[in-house]
Structures are given as C-alpha cells and as structure tokens.
Amino acid sequence: MANTLQAKKRIRSNARRALVNKARKSRIRTFVKNVELALESGNAEEAQVALKAAQPELMRGVTKGVMHKKTASRKVSRLAKRVKALAVSA
C-alpha cells in the first residue's frame, strides 16, 4: 500500500488515466471494426471511407501514448492493403 502523499496521488491519477486510455482504445477498436465490416460486406467505397476515418484515430492513439507507433502503422498498412485489394477486385 502506498505510504507517501505523492504515491497516493499517483494511484488516483493512474486510475483516471486508465479510464481515459480504455475509452480511447475502445474507440480505436470501433473504427477498425467499421473498416472490417465494410470489407466483409464487399463495399469498396464504404471501406475506403471507413479507412480514412480510422487512420487518424489510430495515429491519435499513438500521440496520446495508448499504442506504439509501429503497431498503429502495421494496422493501418494491413487495412489499407485489404481495402486496395477489394477495390481492385471490384
């Protein structure tokens, strides 16, 4: 258990940050899921729009420290590759 005032404050602030980070991760997952649903439906235009919305959200997660830069880049790259493949096949 924390003994110092600063340690107690860090516990409180960490709990607040955890809630914010959890909400941000959930929002990112929702945007990624929207891209995947558009890909499954086979609608290339809808998938492109969803990808354009998901990209900044993923990168915002990087700037806020929720995920690593390379993780976000990898996710964007894989989604873009799938969207492009769908557009070419359509």
Image (spheres, rainbow, N blue to C red):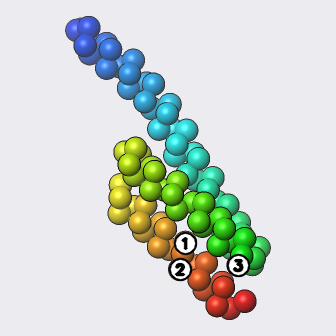
* Residue 20 rendering spot, x and y as whole percentages: 49, 33
* Residue 2 rendering spot, x and y as whole percentages: 27, 13
Amino acid carrying label 2: it is Lys
What is the C-alpha distance between the residues marked 2 and 3? 12 Å
- Circle 3 sits on which residue? 44
Judge from the rendering whether residue 3 lies leftward or rightward of residue 15; answer left or right.
left
Q: Residues within 10 Å of mark 1 (few under 14, many from 20)?
A: many
- Circle 1 sits on which residue? 79
Marking on residue 81: 2
- Furthest toward the left, the residue is 4
Question: Which residue is at a point 26% across and 8% down the rendered structure image?
Answer: 5
Amino acid carrying label 3: it is Ala
Amino acid carrying label 1: it is Leu
What is the C-alpha distance between the residues marked 1 and 2? 5 Å
In which quadrant of the rendered view does residue 49 lie?
Answer: bottom right
In which quadrant of the rendered view does residue 45 lie?
Answer: bottom right
Q: Are marks 1 and 3 in contact (CB under 8 Å)?
A: no
Q: Where does the C terminus fall, quadrant-wise?
A: bottom right
